Image: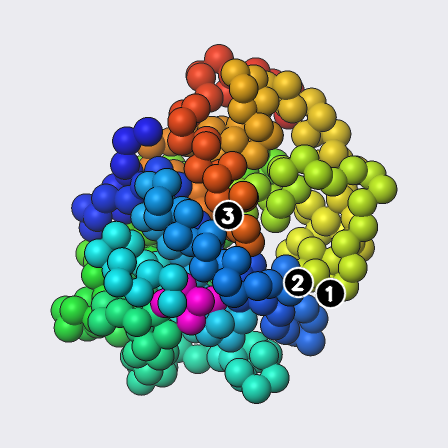
Amino acid sequence: MEQRLLGRSGIKVSPMGIGSWAIGGQFYMDEKIDGYGQTDDETSIKAIETALDLGINLIDTSDAYGIGHSETVIGKAIEGKRNQVILATKFGYMGNEATRTLKGYNLDPGYIERACEASMRRLKTDTIDLYQLHVWEIGLSEMETVVDTLERMTEKGKIRTYGWSTDLVKGAKLFSENRNCSAIQHQLNILQDAPEMIQLCEERNLASINRSPLAMGFLSGKFNQDSFLSPDDVRGAGHSWTESVFKNGRPAPEVLEKLHAVRDILTSNGRTLVQGSLAWIWAKSSVTIPIPGFKTPQQIRENAGAMDHGMLTPKQMEEIDQLLK
């Protein structure tokens, strides 16, 4: 597959990136686990190196993931290879490294600049390619402050462009009116479509960066009605925003039914379920860029294999629409 553009920035990126939430390890938000279990940093580094070897150049992370730990691991993995990477990270949430806990957010200009400097130190870089607001919902006055700060940081060369991680279309419309905004990161997968956000991205020449493209791992196909995830995993920790797929640590029955209905189409032409799910996202629009999470090189290789198969056909997309209605 050909590279895609990171919105109006003109930066070229691979058709998919890698999402680095899981490699941050365990941390807490709202007094609940917000990570995907224990990780091994050496394995994470090998996985990132595998992604680069396979032509994936977009790495997405946040200073919240593991309270900076994800960024630190990435910094080690890309040392000496910075010119091969488009780095995207996020800011806004305040974390305590000693307790590995997120608590509240801070969008003051001084804090944003300090957060950016800290991210650059961990990532071992002197500029961030895409700097994204991580707080999903903010007020209008806060948005104005954030945008003014990001515009100044772009002029200074600390960041090349910026975006927002949110599922709120109205907010994204206002945010994207500013000239150096190039991307909206939002949820998108075959079970959780986002037609209005995709339309906005197309109309405004923005990259649609797709978090949770595999529905927090559900679209790997390894879960069934007997599966159970403990409270030590974000999917079983009781967060309200996971309940559309995982509720009380178990896959929701309705999503199991939906996956069963479309499985044959997604796995056609030699694709795995994961590869078919990514192919669906590419077929939705030319501006979509999925960023599936990972823990191991094996997962990276399977995800990257989707690029060899390309996107689903219009006929397959129509069949899936009919089956999911």
In percent of width and height, residue 143 lies at: 36, 68
The residue closer to the viewer here, 125 or 114, is 125
Write the residue at 44% across / 80% down. 106
In percent of width and height, residue 29 lies at: 62, 72
Q: In what quadrant of the picture does the C terminus appear?
A: top right
Direction from residue 181 to residue 107 in the image, left or right = right
The residue segment tinted magenta is 70-75
Write the residue at 50% across / 20% down. 317
The residue closer to the viewer here, 79 or 164, is 79
Question: Residue at label 2?
Answer: 37
Amino acid found under the numbered disc labelled 3: Pro
The residue closer to the viewer here, 227 or 301, is 301
Marks 2 and 3: which is nearer the front? 3
Q: Secondary structure at mark 3?
A: helix
Amino acid found under the numbered disc labelled 2: Gly
Amino acid found under the numbered disc labelled 1: Asp
Question: Residue at label 1?
Answer: 232
Question: Residue at label 3?
Answer: 297
In percent of width and height, residue 196 lies at: 44, 39
Marks 1 and 3: which is nearer the front? 3
Disc 1 + disc 3, Cβ < 8 Å:
no
